[in-house]
Image (tube, rainbow, N blue to C red):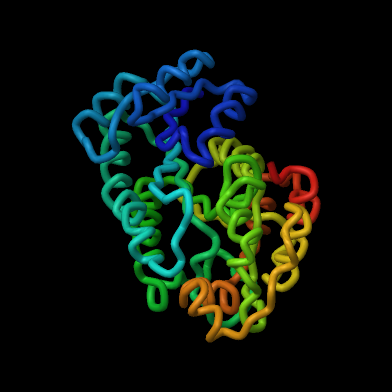
Amino acid sequence: MRVFVAGSTGVMGRPLLPALVDAGHEPIAMTRSPEKAAALREQGIETAICDAYDAPALARELTAARPDAVVHLLTDLPAELDTRHFERAVASTGRLRREGTRNLLAAARAADVGRVVAESIAFAYEPTGDWIKDEDAPLATATLPFVAEPLAELERQVLDVGGTVMRYGQLYGPGTAFASDGAWAKNVRRRQLPIVGSGGGVFSFLHVDDAASATVAALAHEGPATYNVVDDDPAPVREWAPVYARTIHAPRPWRVPAWVGRIVAGSMAVAMMQELRGASGARFKAELGWQPRYASWREGFAQGLG
């Protein structure tokens, strides 16, 4: 299968390209950068140089590539997310999720590509009720509109064309913010990410290589469908954060009250620490027969953090 990958040089795209090759597919890597395209071609990867906001050029490139499927991984997040100005930090990705998705799907229709797999997230559920959410739970459009509303729009557009929405968990592993040299690690070493209040916010993790293998598996699925793609071990911050700190040889995180957390990291970080909901990936595993290499972040942190 020829697979057009939009967002091919990001955190998700980098492990996905070799995973596609290993599975016998032919990836076409879309990038805005001629330099990145040249590096990919040296690895034997076919490329398309294009900007997601240039709808006519995107349509031309996608039609010329003649793909059988499109994988949508477009994001534009800063290397270090400023939780004190979170809305500003995610604004560009929100625009991509609305406008970039619209352009990419229009280009796919013009090229007569009927199979689409798109990246969403499994940690934007409304922070009420059950601590572990399945795919039928509402997104946090009321409490976190600047994140959840663009996600809901992306998902609506993808489902309308019969695509598959993949709500990935908190990604860790090489190249991610949780890698040993990533943004989370730097802040934990500086003791700038304490456990706030109860530390009861639940994280559902996913190794980036498992995200890639799940994406490959989803290419065999006929949509429309929405899936959480997470490991089997959702855990509150107070449980995983000390393990993470120990793994990266950082000091054990402080415990601080919520009011101190708001000063240090902002209200968004406090909400995540105390209210974030985890996700169940049972539906994806049951319907596609997929299993992660790292069933728990516990072994993943120890063996594959990067």
Residue extending farthest to the front is 190
In the picture, measured across the screen, residue 237 lies left or right of residue 222, that is right
The answer to whether residue 229 is above or below residue 116 is: below
In the picture, measured across the screen, residue 303 lies left or right of residue 116, that is right
Q: Where is residue 105 shown, x and y percent of the image?
A: 31, 41
**Of the pair 175 and 106, the residue shown nearer to us:** 175
Q: Residue at x 74, y 55 (%)?
A: 297
Residue 254 visible? The answer is yes
Give the quarter of the image for residue 243.
Answer: bottom right
Q: Quadrant of the C terminus?
A: top right
**Of the pair 250 and 86, the residue shown nearer to us:** 250
The answer to whether residue 214 is above or below residue 189 is: above
Q: Where is residue 88 shown, x and y percent of the image?
A: 33, 62
The answer to whether residue 31 is above or below residue 158 is: above
Q: Residue at x 42, y 37 (%)?
A: 7
Q: Residue at x 77, y 54 (%)?
A: 247
Q: Where is residue 12 shown, x and y percent of the image?
A: 53, 41
Q: Where is residue 260 shown, x and y percent of the image?
A: 55, 82
Residue 296 visible? The answer is no
**Of the pair 160 and 202, the residue shown nearer to us:** 202
Q: Residue at x 59, y 34 (%)?
A: 15
Give the quarter of the image for residue 139.
Answer: bottom left
In the picture, measured across the screen, residue 113 lies left or right of residue 170, that is left
